[in-house]
Image (tube, grey):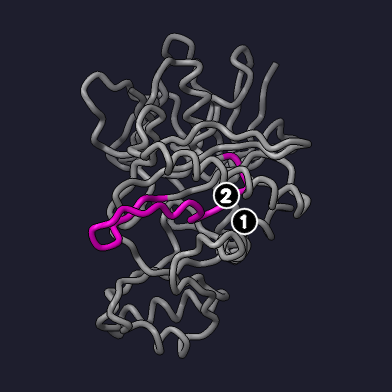
């Protein structure tokens, strides 16, 4: 049997009104999409449809891993899709912020900004900040301020973001670790144990660590509880399907604090993919950068034109 995956990893950008991503981003999305084959039945031939094709020479076969065919476009009928277009409302960052506020775990000062004048009034409030578009992925469509100055080029970029719609304003915290929880919403709410996120200093996504979170025991328990509450909120909103909750631990002076509800992703996440790869290949880490550890196995080889690499270890 052939299993078709609609790897619509550009769904958030489409919700935001971005109809065409830059060529390098499209190529990266294609490479990332190859890993979604782990979500298909292991004995099926898999075709992954996405923004850019990936040559078979970049996708080596491994024990327990037959690489998919990665093609540009969308299937007429898909067995699996990355994000359901009907889930737009619950992927809106305002949904997560409202829930975090009701649970008493929103970051201090987090709010929705609708105009550049509102941002002007708080951009130099002596604390670093970030503004995020309502639908984004992989750390795109956001801007950062130092809380002291608001230079013209930053103001111009923030203005462009606001032309597409409101943004969520948050203080930027000094992170200790980034973590996430995967789950599924059905008649019940099922969540997996937390896993670590490999991120850049600005929150850019670099990979998954299933073995290490750097959470303390109490933080682990709170995060699982909040993930279950997020699943319940999704269920009450009418959503059914996979979801993920992103969180982080940060420095508050000399104290350590957990922000247990940074984002809700009502879709398959790379945490789901990493767990599926773990079951097939016996690995605990998936990386999307150029720093594979010693002994890592490459799932997607880079090229001179597209340097995207995917590795597992």
Q: Is residue 127 left or right of residue 258?
A: left
Question: At 38% across and 41% down in the image, what residue appears?
Answer: 197
Relative to 89, residue 115 above or below: below
Chain part drawn in magenta: 248-268
What is the C-alpha distance between the residues marked 2 and 1? 6 Å
Per the image, the residue denoted by label 2 is 265
Local SS, label 2: strand
Relative to 12, residue 67 above or below: above
Horizontal and vertical percent position of residue 202 = 31, 57
Whichever of callouts 2 and 1 sits on the residue coming sooner in the sequence is: 1
On whether residue 255 falls in the magenta region, the answer is: yes
Q: Which of the pair 65/97 is nearer the observer? A: 97
Relative to 114, residue 174 above or below: above
Horizontal and vertical percent position of residue 245 = 53, 47
Question: At 33% across and 46% down in the image, what residue appears?
Answer: 177
Residue at the extreme top: 63
The reply to whether callout 2 and callout 1 are in contact (CB within 8 Å) is yes
Quarter occupied by residue 96: bottom right
Q: Is residue 115 left or right of residue 155?
A: right
Per the image, the residue denoted by label 1 is 91
Question: At 75% across and 54% down in the image, what residue appears?
Answer: 237
Query: Dot 2: few (<14), some (14–19), or many (≥20) neighbours within 10 Å?
Result: many
The secondary structure making up most of the magenta span is: strand
């Amino acid at each position: 049997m052939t299993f078709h995956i609609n790897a619509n990893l550009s769904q958030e950008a489409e919700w935001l009104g971005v109809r065409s991503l830059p060529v390098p981003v499209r190529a990266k999305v294609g490479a990332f999409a190859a890993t979604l084959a782990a979500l298909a039945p292991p004995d099926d031939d898999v075709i992954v449809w996405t923004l850019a094709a990936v040559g078979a020479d970049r996708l080596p076969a491994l024990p327990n891993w037959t690489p998919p065919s990665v093609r540009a476009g969308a299937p007429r009928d898909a067995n699996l899709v990355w994000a359901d277009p009907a889930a737009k409302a619950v992927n809106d960052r305002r949904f997560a912020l409202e829930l975090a506020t009701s649970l008493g775990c929103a970051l201090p000062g987090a709010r929705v900004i609708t105009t550049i004048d509102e941002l002007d009034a708080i951009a130099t409030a002596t604390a670093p900040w970030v503004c995020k578009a309502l639908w984004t992925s992989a750390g795109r469509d956001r801007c950062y301020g130092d809380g002291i100055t608001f230079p013209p080029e930053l103001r111009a970029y923030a203005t462009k973001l606001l032309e597409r719609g409101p943004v969520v304003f948050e203080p930027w915290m000094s992170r200790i670790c980034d973590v996430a929880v995967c789950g599924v919403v059905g008649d019940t709410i099922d969540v997996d144990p937390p896993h670590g996120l490999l991120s850049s200093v600005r929150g850019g996504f670099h990979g998954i660590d299933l073995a290490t979170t750097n959470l303390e025991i109490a933080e682990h328990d709170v995060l699982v509880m909040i993930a279950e509450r997020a699943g319940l909120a999704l269920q009450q909103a009418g959503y059914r399907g996979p979801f993920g909750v992103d969180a982080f631990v940060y420095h508050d002076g000399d104290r350590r604090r957990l922000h247990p509800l940074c984002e809700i992703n009502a879709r398959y996440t790379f945490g789901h993919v990493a767990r599926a790869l773990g079951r097939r290949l016996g690995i605990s880490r998936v990386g999307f950068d150029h720093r594979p550890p010693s002994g890592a196995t490459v799932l997607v080889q880079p090229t001179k034109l597209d340097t995207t690499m995917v590795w597992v270890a």
